[in-house]
Amino acid sequence: QGRQMEQSPGTYAGMGEEARRQTIVATLNTHYAGRAHAEAFNHEGKTDILIRFEGRNLFICECKFWSGAEGFSSTIDQLFRYTGWRDTKLAIVMFVREKALTGIVAKGKAALAKHPQFVAWKDAVTETELRATMRWSGDDERFADLNVLFVHTPQGRS
């Protein structure tokens, strides 16, 4: 769905975070038979996307517009507030309206590497994705996988 947004940025230009999130949830539900939910309560709040199956959380995701490295770090903290110890598959979708995506991905990578819960990098599939192993705050022996996807929908013409 992120690739579709990038291929037709004008279609999504007027959409806020919630509308974009809903398109992702709709796409996920074509694969997960209606198990993807938006604004689902989990742990200490409502996460943007939650996929639950047989009483277990399979996937938890926060969606945000890029607002800088500090905002990105806050999003990581927010995601962990909405997850419990058994939740190990986490994601952040960063909608980027700025044109200089390469620099933004680099800033995101630097911020993630500095995060106190960061453990190690994992191999990413594309240049607009970050994958990392993160530790649980207060439990140095418990880890979670975090994938960060940067979806580029620049505003205006070059």
Image (cartoon, rainbow, N blue to C red):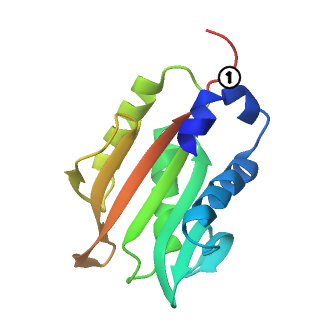
Please say if 4 is above or below 155: below
**Image side of residue 25 versus residue 112, left or right:** right
**Image side of residue 72 versus residue 102, left or right:** right
Q: Position of residue 54 (x, y in %)?
A: 51, 90
Mark 1: amino acid: Gln
Q: Position of residue 143 (x, y in %)?
A: 27, 72
Between 143 and 9, the residue placed more toward the observer is: 9
- The kind of secondary structure element at disc 1 is loop
Which residue is pictured at 39% across the width and 54% down the height? 147
**Image side of residue 112 versus residue 149, left or right:** left
In terms of image quadrants, where is residue 66? top right
Q: Position of residue 93 (x, y in %)?
A: 52, 49
Q: Is residue 96 visible?
A: no
Please say if 81 is above or below 151: below
Q: Looking at the image, which residue sits at the far bottom?
A: 55
- Total labels drawn: 1
Please say if 44 is above or below 157: below
Within-10-Å neighbours for mark 1: few <14, some 14–19, many 20+: some
Which residue is pictured at 34% across the width and 33% down the height? 127
Which residue is pictured at 40% across the width and 25% down the height? 102
Residue denoted by label 1: 155
Which residue is pictured at 40% across the width and 36% down the height? 128
Q: Is residue 117 visible?
A: yes
